[in-house]
Amino acid sequence: MKPITGRDPVSGRTGVIQAAQTLVDSGQFASDLAEIVSRPTESQNPQRCNEMQAYLAEMLIPRLTTSGFVCTIHSNPLGHPFLVARRIEDAILPTVLGYGHGDVTRGQEGEWGQDRQPFELGQEGDRLYGRGTADNKGQHLINLQALECVLAARGRLGFNAIWLFEMSEETGSPGLVEFCEQNKDLLAADVLIASDGPRMSPEVPLVFLGARGAVNFSLSVELRDGAHHSGNWGGLLADPAVILAHALATITDRRGQVQVPEWHPTSLTPDIRAVIEKLPLPVGPQIDADWGEENLTPQERVYGWNSFAVLAMESGVPSAPVNAIAGKARATCQLRFVTGTDADDILPALRRHLDAKGFQQVVLEQEESGFFPATRSAPDNPWVARVVDSLERTTGVAPHLAPNLGGSLPNHVFMDILGLPTIWIPHSYGGCNQHAPDEHMLIPVAKQALGLMAGLYWDLGEHTPD
């Protein structure tokens, strides 16, 4: 995978945008993407541990070193290693922190269509298939190539750049908090500009400023050991699944409206509503208009409110049911929450709610993984205006601006620990099949994104907000 160097000189902003987008037309983008997709960096697979270090050392460091970055791999006692790359042009210049993750979810070999292989890049129409094409290898490749085009054209960035790459994001980013706490000086910057997650529309760029938080927990009812014949004992033994179902039914009403008062956020203010009302709905399955908070718009439900979901339920043996009353039942649940929700009180509030409803026998336990705090940068931050203006200048269309993504990512590390405003510019879309068979990158999105990021990096080097 060769960095972009020694290209024919281009002139100005328009030239560097064209040079970046030509990488798609020439096949260079697909060639580089094929090389990094071929590395099976499955962080959920213990047999792939050696691939994590190799991806950083063999795929990223040569590229970044050629672009003038000083690179260091850091061990991670709680997970896979980190890579920090720094290019400091002048101490008086602003510093932009970039982020990406090189690990992917399991490849799911044998489940892809048309005999596709997860770690072999395949093209069909305007889709580039492969694990990591959308999440996140393709996205950070776009940003690196765009940055290289600016360096090739101007010989400098005009700002300082730091990159942080991790290899454990798909297992919950273990060690990321501790690493950033211990390396604040190494990662000191003025703003985070990174790419992850999907756009709301494939055609229109998106800027989002944070993410909903998530907390996973289990609710269980265990009444006795083993199961008992439903004929001999039916009507005499309480059914734990029925008790659990009634307990779950108190958390929301029949249309999914949250019934735990402490789970109602205070952050859906008029200014945030004004931002959200301009947003489209995610591209994907048709939404259920009669689901969720009745007095909110669909956009407000997903970007400005909290939602509860039952991720899995089990009682007895679902794959082979027998005529018996089970002794226990369990549900794995999740609350997605926005800022304005007391994260420390989410589960205590649920405990109080269940007790008040008479379900003291329901056991509540937080899952060991699956927690992200909610975050949201201020929409009126001058860095936001600078980025939005640059993207609009490139495309002629105002990008969507979202206060937060509906999903979750480790944005709290950059906001709460490093103290940065955070600006995310995703290069994927809702139908990309990330974490599933047939994950893909849309070629038109990649081409537009290369131009967007080249234009943005060019603009940041010309003048930046105080």
Image: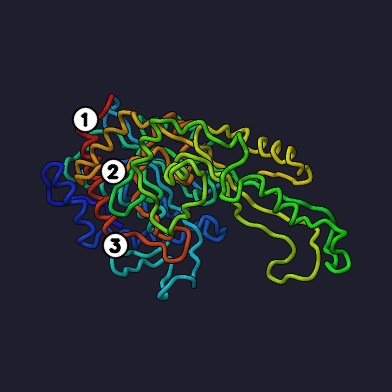
Asked whether, in this view, residue 231 is left or right of residue 94, the answer is right
Q: Position of residue 175 (x, y in %)?
A: 54, 41
What colour-coding does the image apply?
rainbow
Q: Amino acid at mark 1?
A: His
Q: Position of residue 83 (x, y in %)?
A: 43, 44
Between residue 345 and residue 245, name the one nearer to us. 245
Q: CA distance from mark 1 to mark 3?
A: 33 Å
Asked whether, in this view, residue 459 is left or right of residue 361, the answer is left
Q: Amino acid at mark 2?
A: Pro
Between residue 197 and residue 87, name the one nearer to us. 197
Read off the residue under disc 3: 31
Q: Earlier in the sequence, mark 2 or mark 1?
A: 2
Density class for disc 3 (Cα within 10 Å; few <14, some 14-19, many ≥20) is some
Could you tell me which quadrant the N terminus lies in?
bottom left
Tell me which corner region of the image, top left, top right, bottom left or bottom right, holds residue 165.
Answer: top left
Asked whether, in this view, residue 320 is left or right of residue 419, the answer is right
* Of labels 1 and 3, the one closer to you: 1
Read off the residue under disc 1: 463
* Up-down relation of residue 152 to residue 430 (above or below): above
For the point 47% across and 44% down, the residue is 301
Q: CA distance from mark 2 to mark 1?
A: 21 Å
Density class for disc 2 (Cα within 10 Å; few <14, some 14-19, many ≥20) is many
Q: Earlier in the sequence, mark 1 or mark 3?
A: 3
| Tag 3–tag 2 contact (CB < 8 Å) | no
Q: Position of residue 259 (x, y in %)?
A: 61, 41
Read off the residue under disc 2: 399
Residue that extends furthest to the bottom in the rendered view of this protein: 115
Could you tell me which quadrant the C terminus lies in?
top left
